[in-house]
Image (cartoon, grey):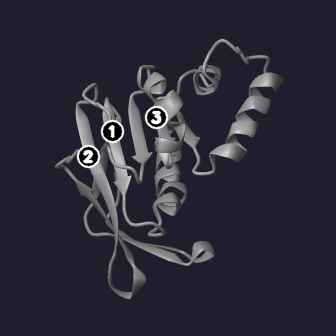
Amino acid sequence: MKMILEKGTYYFKERSITYQVKEDLEFKVDNSLYFISGNNGIGKTAFIELLLIPLLKKAQLNFAYLEQNKDNQLYTIQASLALCNKFDKSKDLYINWLEALDYPTLLIADEFDKYQSSFQKILHTTINGLFLVSHLGRKKDYSQFKNIKNITISLGSKGVRMITLENNYNA
């Protein structure tokens, strides 16, 4: 399965942010890992929420999103699992959550370093694709993924955010 973010300019009035995609960007879902990188405040989270998630929904892909604000989401996940009677205290909270979601095809983790205690367990589930944002670098072994790429968001002229997909992965 693959998705295309089409070439063009994307303006989001509600966030006062513009993204420029100079060429069609193809994202493959099969056994793929995408790092989303850019300076603090450049718009990585907005990219996820305004471009990536709508693209995943359009492709009708089953995905889960671990937001940047871990603490708020942590309580929501715990409450949801308790309401569904799916909370197993012997398992990691995020593994419980992924099981309750029937192991989505993709996982988006914004600032995934906040989830490090769970992350290695998550990597060994049936998730087939990851989109990761991190400010601490990439120190883990991701050799189980055959397709590893970098989505870079940089500041262009007049405050426009430029989105590029780099085929060369640098650890």
Between disc 2 and disc 3, the foreground one is 2
**Mark 2 or mark 1, which is nearer the start of the sequence?**
1
- Residue 145: image quadrant is top left
Residue 50 in picture, x, y percent from top left = 53, 60
Relative depth, front residue between 92 and 144: 92
**Mark 3 or mark 2, which is nearer the start of the sequence?**
3
Amino acid at circle 1: Leu
Check contact, mark 2 vs mark 3: CB within 8 A. Answer: no
Q: CA distance from mark 2 to mark 3?
A: 15 Å
Question: Mark 3 Cα within 10 Å, few/some/many (few <14, many 20+)?
Answer: many
Task: Left or right? Give the position of 82 relative to 53.
Answer: right
Residue 154 in picture, x, y percent from top left = 33, 70
Amino acid at circle 2: Lys
Amino acid at circle 3: Leu
- Residue 101: image quadrant is top right
The reply to whether residue 3 is visible in this rendering is no
Residue 81 in picture, x, y percent from top left = 74, 25
SS of the residue at dot 2? strand
The residue that appears at 34% across and 60% down in the rendered structure is 6
The numbered mark at residue 33 is: 1
Q: Is residue 35 above or below residue 14?
A: above
Check contact, mark 1 vs mark 2: CB within 8 A. Answer: yes
Residue 99 in picture, x, y percent from top left = 60, 19
Q: CA distance from mark 1 to mark 3?
A: 10 Å
Relative depth, front residue between 160 and 58: 160
Q: Is residue 36 above or below residue 2?
A: below
